[in-house]
């Protein structure tokens, strides 16, 4: 999608829903134009009227927080309910937040859990946090609220780190990403018919013993809280998968290491095929909701039940009954080397808060292990994007899921 204002306006006025949405984002954020919340609302409303779930979700946030419009929780709820019908996981997450806090509706942790469960099945990590805290961790209601907020703040801080690592298309003169592999591996992907295929690896199945361990080792040697959530320096994170690329092409050492001793292949991919901005994170919006409800303590018990695994991320489908695409747009993150201190410092206070919640609750090893597992799951996204100095020459970039 081009970001040229005149071109976007022409497309939007011609009925292009994606252009309407992007134009609204530009006006809302002041991205290349002066901030104009009225224009943002106008274009999100036009896209929402045409059934675009993402526009409904953003519009609902405007009314929920009262940003650029008069606060109207009822209107926000109705917009989110409509977006949720269209399979938008973030709308489901925000509905869960409304019912958890009783903000604009009666407190109903059962309804909150239902919405979070649905969103978690679509791959929304924040909803997965909420559903697991409500349904799978047996903890005092006051501690429950603090734990939920601590884990959401951790998610937000990790997203901030990912923003810094985001590799924008054609940034710094870079035009491509390269994947070195074997002809056999390529053939196995080409055999899958009528589908986009991306080969990804779990941390536990890679040969490099340092993979994902650099940040944990640094934390352990510096007595940082982060290391206390891991039993070993080698991370046991079963939910994180990644695909690796090099920002070098025709490097002899990379051909030897990954290209079958020079007999393999190098797939060169233009950076333009990757997202030109990180995936939607809604960090500011979640912070606003937490700030609005920071003094509310609700004692209603939550539902019981197991945590669900996560599925593919919702893409904000624009038609009733639409489902998430099998392969969402891909975001590329450049691996950084040796920058452990910055990451540890950003996360330390939040992790201390979570640790204090564990320590202040009645001793229950099972519940503490569930909390540790959630923390490890969240940290998994950055464990594979911060590496030790020895690998700096590879200039690696990664897709992380």
Image (spheres, rainbow, N blue to C red):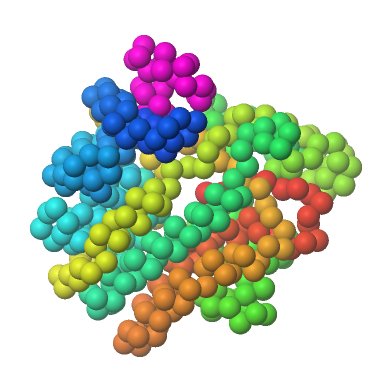
In screen coordinates, is 343 left or right of 156? right
State which region is magenta: 1-23
- Give above or below for 105 relative to 192: below
Q: Would residue 18 be visible to someone looking at this image?
A: no
- Residue 293, by quadrant, is bottom left
- 100 drawn magenta: no
Residue 29 on image: x %, y %:
42, 38
* Residue 169 appears left or right of 30: right
Classify 260 as above or below 53: below
Residue 2 part of the magenta-drawn span: yes
Return the x and y of residue 218 as percentages of the image width and height: 67, 73
For this orientation, the residue located farthest to the front is: 34
The residue under the point 77% across, 34% down is 266
With 336 as the anchor, is 56 left or right in this view? left
Q: Quadrant of residue 323?
A: top left
Residue 262 visible, this orientation? yes
Left or right placement of residue 42 versus residue 334 in this view: left
Please say if 319 is above or below 119: above
């Amino acid at each position: 999608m081009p970001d040229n204002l005149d071109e976007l306006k022409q497309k939007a006025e011609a009925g292009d829903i994606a252009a309407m949405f992007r134009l609204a984002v530009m006006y809302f954020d002041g991205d290349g134009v002066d901030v104009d919340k009225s224009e943002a609302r106008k274009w999100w409303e036009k896209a929402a009227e045409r059934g675009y779930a993402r526009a409904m979700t953003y519009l609902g946030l405007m009314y929920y927080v009262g940003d650029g419009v008069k606060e109207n929780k009822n209107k926000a709820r109705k917009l989110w309910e409509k977006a949720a019908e269209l399979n938008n996981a973030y709308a489901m997450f925000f509905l869960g937040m409304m019912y958890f806090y009783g903000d604009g509706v009666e407190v109903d942790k059962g309804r909150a859990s239902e919405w979070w469960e649905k969103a978690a099945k679509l791959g929304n990590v924040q909803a997965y946090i909420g559903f697991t805290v409500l349904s799978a961790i047996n903890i005092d209601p006051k501690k429950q609220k603090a734990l939920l907020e601590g884990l959401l703040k951790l998610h937000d801080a990790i997203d901030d780190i990912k923003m810094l690592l985001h590799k924008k298309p054609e940034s710094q003169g870079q035009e491509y990403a390269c994947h070195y592999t074997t002809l056999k591996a390529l053939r196995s992907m080409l055999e899958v018919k009528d589908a986009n295929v991306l080969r990804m690896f779990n941390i536990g199945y890679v040969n490099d013993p340092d993979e994902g361990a650099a940040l944990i080792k640094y934390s352990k040697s510096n007595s940082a809280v982060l290391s206390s959530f891991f039993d070993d320096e080698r991370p046991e994170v079963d939910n994180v998968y990644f695909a690796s690329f090099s920002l070098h092409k025709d490097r002899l050492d990379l051909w030897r290491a990954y290209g079958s001793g020079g007999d393999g292949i190098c797939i060169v991919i233009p950076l333009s095929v990757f997202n030109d901005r990180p995936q939607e994170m809604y960090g500011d919006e979640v912070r606003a909701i937490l700030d609005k409800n920071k003094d509310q303590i609700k004692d209603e018990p939550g539902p019981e039940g197991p945590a669900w695994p996560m599925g593919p991320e919702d893409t904000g489908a624009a038609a009733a009954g639409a489902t998430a695409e099998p392969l969402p747009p891909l975001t590329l993150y450049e691996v950084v080397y040796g920058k452990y201190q910055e990451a540890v410092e950003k996360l330390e206070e939040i992790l201390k808060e979570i640790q204090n919640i564990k320590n202040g609750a009645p001793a229950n090893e099972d519940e503490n292990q569930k909390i540790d597992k959630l923390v490890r799951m969240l940290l998994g996204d950055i464990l594979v994007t911060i590496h030790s100095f020895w690998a700096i020459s590879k200039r690696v970039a990664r897709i992380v899921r």
